[in-house]
Structures are given as structure tokens and as C-alpha cells.
Image (cartoon, rainbow, N blue to C red):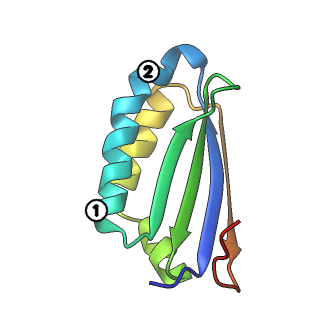
Amino acid sequence: MEAKVAVFGILRFPPENVQSVLPHLKEFVQATQDNDGCILYEVAEDPFDQGLIRFSEVWPDRESLEKHLVAPHIGPWREQAKKYGLMERVFNSYDISSRSIPV
């Protein structure tokens, strides 16, 4: 499947809440990977900035991304994120116009 859209983002939580939010994040990511048509959907805690969680996403097209943004598991995840003190959310999408080249 050819990638057409990349998304990079961050969520910031109070460092003391990250361990509590991770089970909810894991459930959300698994639902996204299983149901939303992404090519790649990866999440990682930043080892150098406590409380920062980074997202890397690759989608086959903008339509798939738009469907993901209104998927049934988005609402419950956002409620849990608020519950655990979400402080910052920044996501940007980019249209990809070339094939992947190993570096």
C-alpha cells in the first residue's frame, strides 16, 4: 500500500500521570491499528522529556485519516486523556509526494 499522508504529533501529560494513561493509550492505538486503515501508527514516550508522548502515523490517503478522526474509539480516548491531565496536543499532517527511500 502506497503512503500518501504522514502525521506527526505530540501529547503532553503531567509526568506523574503517564503510567496511568498508558493502558488507555495502548487500547486506543490497538483499535486504530486494527480498524482505521493506517499503514503505520506508532507511539512512544520521549526518553528526554518526561510526560511527552510522540506519534508517527502513515496513511494511504487523506480520506482514511479523516475517518480515523471520527472513529468510535476517538471519543473515549480523548475523555481519558482529559481525565489524566492532557496539557498539550499538537498534530500536523503532510502530503507525501515521493516514494520511501532508505537512508
Question: Label 1 amino acid?
Answer: Asp
Q: Name the residue under label 1.
A: 34
**Distance from the alpha carbon under mark 2 to that under mark 1:** 23 Å
Please tell me whether residue 86 is drawn above or below residue 71 in the rendered image: above
Q: Can residue 69 be seen in this view?
A: no
Q: In which quarter of the image is residue 53?
A: top right
Q: Indicate which disc residue 19 carries.
A: 2
User: Which residue sits at x=42%, y=39%?
Assistant: 79
Q: Position of residue 96 (x, y in %)?
A: 68, 80
Q: Is residue 23 visible?
A: yes
Q: Quadrant of residue 22?
A: top left
Please tell me whether residue 84 is drawn above or below residue 68 in the rendered image: above
- First in sequence: mark 2 vs mark 1: 2
Q: In which quarter of the image is residue 24?
A: top left
Q: Indicate which disc residue 4 carries.
A: none
At label 1, counting other C-alpha atoms closer than 10 Å, the crowd grade (few under 14, some 14-19, many 20 or more) is few
Q: Position of residue 26 (x, y in %)?
A: 35, 40
